[in-house]
Image (cartoon, coloured by chain):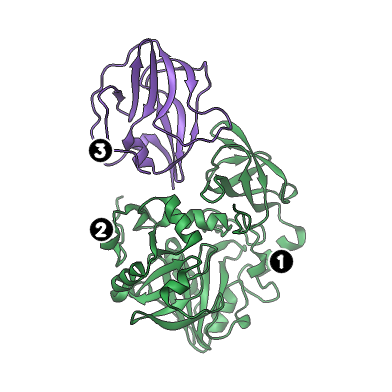
Chain colours: A green, B purple
Amino acid sequence: MAQTLLRTPLHDRHVALGARMVPFAGWEMPVQYEGVIPEHKAVRSDCGVFDVSHMGEFEVEGPRATELLQATLSNDLEKIGPGRAQYTLLTNERGGIIDDLIVYRLDEFRYLLIVNAANREPDRRWLREREIPGSDVRDVSDEYALLAVQGPRAIERLGLPQAEQFTFAEGEIDGIHCLVNRTGYTGEDGCELLVMAEDAGELWDRVLVRGAVPCGLGARDTLRLEVCYPLHGNDITPETDAISAGLGWCCALDKEFSGAQELREIKALGPVRKLVPFVMEEKAIPRQGMAIEGGGEVTSGTHSPMLDKGIGLGYVMADAATPDSALTIDVRGRARRGRVVKRPIYHREEAD
Amino acid sequence: MAASETYPDDLKYHKEHDWARIEGGEAVLGITWFAQDSLGELVHYEPPNEGDTISKDSAYGEVESVKAVSDVIAPLSGEVLEVNQKDGERRPVRGRLARADPVGRCRRGGVPSRRRRVQASRRRSLS
C-alpha cells in the first residue's frame, strides 16, 4: 500500500538545492546534495548542516515525570540536572532496545526526548501505556524542526559560545530563537538546533550563509559509522540487548527499569555475541545482512571516506570479539578478510 | 565528480546502461555516465578474472558507491582479455571496465532513454 511520505518544513529548499530525495522512515528526506563523500569531508574538516526534522520529540512533564522515565529509560536521570542531556535507551521487558534517544532535562519536572523517526509511534505507545498520575507524555514532533550543525568549525561559524558536550541552552542564531543542544551523531563538535517549525526555513538559510555545507542522510550514516554510533533498526533493535551491543555504559543496572533484571543476567553470564566495529583488510564493502564466518552478521557497513576502505559494525561470537581478531565476511559469495578494531574506527589523529 | 553527460556515437549501448566499443576483433566494455551518476560516487569495482567467459545480458562484475551495489551487465558474450583494475590495485573507477574478445556482436541499441532512475533490478542494496 502506497503511503504519502511526510515532508519537513525544509523540503522545498532541499529540492531547490538539487538534493536527491529518498523515502526514509516514512519521510521524504535528502540523501545527498553534492555527494556523500564531499559532504562527509566537509563535516570532518569544517562544518555541515543536516535537516533532521523527521526525528520525533516528546515532552514529559509533571511531578512524577522523573519516576516514569526512571522506570522506562536505562540511564540514571539522577546524574543530570536542568540544562544537561543524556544518551539513554528505551528498553522492553527482555532488555531489548525499543529505541535509543537523548533526554534533555528542561527543569526538575520537565524533560524533552528526541527519538528516532521510525520509532516515534512505538515509543509514544510504550510511554503512554506506562503513564502514571502526575506524568504527562506529549508528542510535540510537529511543532519543531531540528537542524544538526556539525564539524570542528560549527560553533565558531554559528557565533555560539563554547559549551560542554551534552549541555543545552536557549540561544539565538541571527535573531532566530532556538534551543542549542550540544549533541550530535557525527563524532565532531557541533550542536543540534531545535527550532519552531515556522522558523526552520529562515534558520536553515542563515546557517548556509554562515558557511555550513548542506549534508544528507548518506553522509550522516558514513559519519556515525566511522565513530561507531549504533543505528537503531540496524545495529540495535528490540531483539538485541544493550550489553551485547556494548551499551552497558548507559544502563544503570543499580536501579529498576524495564528489562533491568534481564540485562543484569546477561552481564553476569557474559553475552553470547557482541557488537564489534571492524575494518576490511581486502578491497570490499561490507553491507547490512552479510554473514560473518563463525555465526556472525554485519549490521551496518559502508565505505569509509576518511580511511578509504570498507568498515562496519556487526555481531560476532564473544570469543571472536576482541580487537585485532580476524574475521571473514561473505561478500556476495566471496570471502573477504577484515579485522575487529577498537571504537571508534576513525580518529582524527590517525588519519593522514 | 559527476560523469559528463554524453553518449559517444562510437559506443554500442545495452539497455542496462552498459556499453561496448568494438575495436577490430576486440571490444572495450564499460558503464554509461547515467549509471555512474545514478549510483553516486563509485568507490569500488569488483572485476571479473582475465580469461572468464561472459555472456550477454548477464553480470560480469559489480560496481559500488557508498550506498549501493550494482551489477555490471555484459552487452555481448565473449572472453575477458584484460580488466581495468588488478587485484589490490587502487585506481579511480572509470567508465571503461574491461576488454573482451566477443563471440557475437551486440546489436546497436541506440542511445538509452534518460530515465530518472536506474531500473530497480540493477540496485540490489540501497539503504
**Residue type, label 2:** Ala
Tell me whether marks 3 and 2 sit on the same chain: no
Which residue carries the number 2 mark? A16
The x and y percentages for residue B74 are 39, 22
Chain of the residue under the numbered disc 1 shown in the image: A
Work out how far the residue at label 1 is from the one at label 3, CA to CA, in angstroms.
55 Å
Chain of the residue under the numbered disc 3 shown in the image: B
Tell me the residue at 67%/61% (across/down): A243
| Foreground pick, A320 / A165 | A165
Location of residue A108 with respect to A239 vertically, above or below? below
| Foreground pick, A152 / A226 | A152
Q: Are marks 3 and 2 in contact (CB under 8 Å)?
A: no
Which residue carries the number 1 mark? A264
Mark in front: 2 vs 1: 2
The x and y percentages for residue A307 are 57, 48
Tell me the residue at 51%/64% (across/down): A185
Apparent side of residue A314 relative to residue A104 in the rendered image (left or right): right
Tell me the residue at 40%/15% (across/down): B77
Q: Are marks 1 and 3 in contact (CB under 8 Å)?
A: no
The x and y percentages for residue A100 are 53, 65
Location of residue A279 with respect to A176 vertically, above or below? above
Instruction: Answer with mark 2 or mark 1, whichever residue precedes in sequence.
Output: 2
Chain of the residue under the numbered disc 2 shown in the image: A
**Residue type, label 3:** Arg
Which residue carries the number 3 mark? B115
**Residue type, label 1:** Arg
| Foreground pick, A130 / A211 | A211
